[in-house]
Image: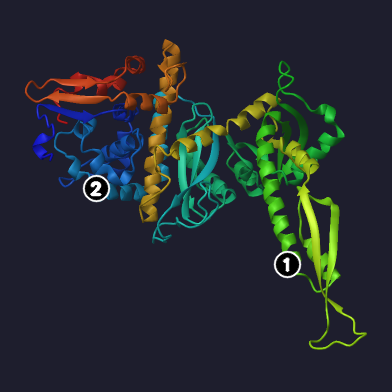
Amino acid sequence: MASLDDFDDDNEQVTAELGDLGLTAAGFDYFNLDEPIEFCIGKVGSHVKFKSSEIVKLLCCQVLNVPYQSLYGTQEFYRNRPLQALINRKDVTFEQLDRNVLSRTLDAIAEFGPEKLFLRCSAKVAEKLGLKVESVHLDSTSFHYSGEPRIEDGCNIVLDQGYSRDNHPELGQINELMLCDELSKLPIFETCVSGHVSDKTSFRNVITDYWDSIKAQFKDLRYLTGDSALCTSPIAKAAKEHCIKMVTRIPDKNDEATACRKMLKAHPEELVSVDENNPEGTKAMWCGEGKLGDETVKKLLVQNELLYSTKKRIITKRAEKELDKVNSQLKKLWTQPCKCKADAEQELKKITAKLVKLTDAGIGYEEVQKYTHKGRHGKDEQKVTVAVKVRAEVELDDTAIEQKIKEDTYYVICTNDVERKWTMAELIGVYKKQSVVERNWRCLKDKKLLINAIYLELPSRINALMWIMTTALLIYTATEYLMRKKMQEQKLTIPSPDHKVQLEKPSLMRLYQYIGNSGTVLQCNRSTGKVSVLGLPTEVKLVLISMGDEWCRYYLKSYYQDKAF
């Protein structure tokens, strides 16, 4: 039988997991994020165990650590990691990183205002990278909440049900909005709203409530791009009042979009290739000017045949659901017949379907006849019709489905910058970069990060937690931008996960994964005091060197010679 003495416990060698923590910590330092954080929510006094910036730094490191960790296990997470070295402190321990300390930091963020604090941080990062932010993209997503929805005095955010982007409509949620720089993908602004608030409302509020503050930090900002939720009369009016040049998509059912499709039918020859050198690529046609409320917009109808396979899958699935629904309704007309044929015909009219049609068998009516009374019936007594059953067979309407697929490969985009001499490629290019926000959402909601299931209770603290998450994303995006730039300049690569391909433009997540899978650790010999950094791949070392000495710091053994971990 095994005993404790049988387990190897070499006290001579002390090992601490480092992994990708050094890269995130270096990013926090490089972008000087401690300065705006301490200025806005700094704490002073002998009772303060950790600075606010230190808490934020440690939480961002934890959020971005691979493999993922949930934030309610912060103490345990730093039990075997170089906590003191990461924040350059010798007088703190992981036990002090308890929920009370973390909660007070979240409260400080909520009290100051996550929007104001994030703007200061993003401006600091953009300045360090030398970015000139001229065009941004706006989008939103939802994060579901597993607890009971609650209202908190002094906080205007309610965790309640709304349109769920993560397939949990039965749960309460919080919605987050984010503005991202078009070129660098850097998030420059974030705000959270109640789960039930629509994008049309929250998008307008970003302009009316925050745009002046955003412009104060990013003075070159001119263009705002968003999806069809941005295309409303109140938003167009607010955009004009704040001198915003807007690019958006007109909803398909909007009269302005309908007019463009009619124009296409009347003049199909005006649909031309956007790129003359690629006649099989995207096609478009100018549709003149239109009105968004009282504001004039320039319209462009776009056809993207590359969407055909995606639209076919989506619309076919929609048609199959419609077929199931119609069959269910028809079955009810058979099992629960109407009183007369007129009623049956009226009920049939209520069954609407766009992608389903009747089979050649058509519609049949079957009368249900009974005697008017019980008992013996007279010789000449006739049965009377007491109900009418409906028999009908339906099938998918392939013609309607194909027509719908083709229609959905067309969309209309517009801009209120009617004075600019746009080319088709320019306007389409601006709109398509909307994916920069969606990419950042995918990163935030990656299961590696495990943040879309929130375990806090107070809405204000959940709002502050979302600020932590988005600040981690800010560090991630800025680090990736700089990493790719330096790798391109130095012609560096790192291997793909199967090591069959060398990646010239890897995601930062791949670099994190490579470091994590390589088992990068710190090791210290108690007797000699010698510190070693083990397991860091050569390709990663070259990338860090290309980025600068600041990025190498936490992977150099010299940094740890006089530091406890």
Asked which quadrant contains residue 484, the reply is top left
Q: Position of residue 118 (x, y in %)?
A: 40, 39
Q: Which residue is mark 2?
A: 101
Left or right, 217 with respect to 372, comes to: left
Q: Say what secondary structure mark 2 lies in.
A: helix
Left or right, 490 with respect to 308, comes to: left
Instruction: Residue at the far left: name it.
Output: 527
Indicate the quadrant containing the C terminus: top left, top right, bottom left or bottom right.
top left
The CA span between labels 2 and 1 is 64 Å
In-front residue for pair 405/160: 405
Q: Say what secondary structure mark 1 lies in.
A: helix
Q: Amino acid at mark 2?
A: Val
Q: Going 18% across and 24% down the picture, which residue do you hit?
A: 523
Q: Amino acid at mark 1?
A: Thr
Indicate the quadrant containing the N terminus: top left, top right, bottom left or bottom right.
top left
Q: Which residue is mark 1?
A: 335
Q: Going 30% across and 44% down the picture, which residue do you hit?
A: 41
Asked which quadrant contains residue 386, the reply is bottom right
Dot label at residue 225: none
Dot 2 crowding, Cα within 10 Å, few <14, some 14–19, many 20+: some
Left or right, 382 with respect to 252, comes to: right
Q: Position of residue 178 (x, y in %)?
A: 49, 40
Give the mark nearest the N terminus, 2 or 1: 2
Q: Do tag 2 and tag 1 residues touch (Cβ < 8 Å)?
A: no
Asked which quadrant contains residue 246, the reply is top right
Q: Going 80% across and 61% down the picture, which residue do you hit?
A: 391
Note whether 134 is above or below 248 in the view shown: above
Q: Is residue 464 visible?
A: yes
Q: Position of residue 308 (x, y in %)?
A: 70, 33
Q: Going 30% across and 30% down the picture, which residue do you hit?
A: 21
Q: Is residue 49 visible?
A: no
